Amino acid sequence: KAGVTQTPRYLIKTRGQQVTLSCSPISGHRSVSWYQQTPGQGLQFLFEYFSETQRNKGNFPGRFSGRQFSNSRSEMNVSTLELGDSALYLCASSSRGASGGAITDTQYFGPGTRLTVL
Amino acid sequence: KQEVTQIPAALSVPEGENLVLNCSFTDSAIYNLQWFRQDPGKGLTSLLLIQSSQREQTSGRLNASLDKSSGRSTLYIAASQPGDSATYLCAVRGNNDMRFGAGTRLTVKP
């Protein structure tokens, strides 16, 4: 079974531009989460989508947005890029199985998109 | 607000040693805890997932335990190998998000 794929793998943008990153989850997975990883802040949760609906959102400005399509593929968009947005952006998918109301899923990560803002 | 701490930040051991990595969290209202490894410049690889109702999980040379009441988890690696060198992260799944520790950078010397 193919893993989580992210495109592109590398991006270089300049301040003020916008960028769109793409994530294709493992076949059959309906949940996609996005994370930002930087040396200073570590891994931080951006948002989570399940069945095309945003279920949770981390503490990031409105410049960060995302969506999920009916085939579970997801995109995230960052508008008006700032230098501090340079990071590795990771996507993870899970089946988001539930047992007695608890979230029982294992998250599987893609290789990430390295974004550099100049 | 959930805080996740991993100790030590870095660890260097000779090949063959058994070792323990620690993870602590401040809010015991969690759904599960997951251990990952990350190789430089790469994504995360899931190692073990422990549900909140479980005490431990094992996979090969890895054993992870969870004590939810005290807010602690440990990852035990038996008979370490140079290929185990990586950064190990624990992540706690709550109702609204998943919180990660800063990781333990492990180096296993041949």
Image: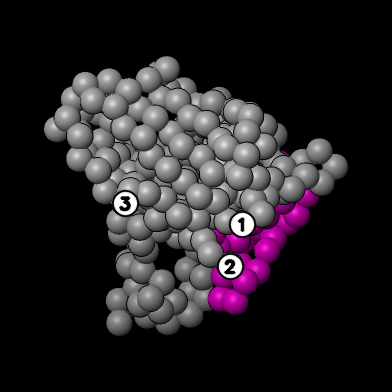
Q: Amino acid at mark 3?
A: Arg
**Dot 2: what SS?**
loop
Look at the image and give the residue range highlighted in magenta. B46-74
Query: On the image, which quarter does residue B15 sit in?
Result: bottom left
Q: Amino acid at mark 2?
A: Lys
> What's the distance in space between the residues labelled 1 and 2, CA to CA?
7 Å
SS majority, magenta: strand
Residue in view at x 32 percent, y 67 percent: B107
Q: Residue B13 versus residue A13: which sits nearer the camera?
A: A13
Q: Which residue is mark 1?
A: A27
Marks 1 and 3 share the same chain = yes
**Dot 3: what SS?**
loop
Mark 3, other Cα within 10 Å: few <14 / some 14–19 / many ≥20: some
Mark 1 and mark 3 residues within 8 Å of each other at the beta carbon = no
Subunit ID for the residue under disc 3: A
Q: Amino acid at mark 1?
A: Ser
Position of B42 relative to B52 (above/below): below
For the N terminus of chain B, the quadrant is: top right
Task: Residue A1: give its label.
Answer: 2
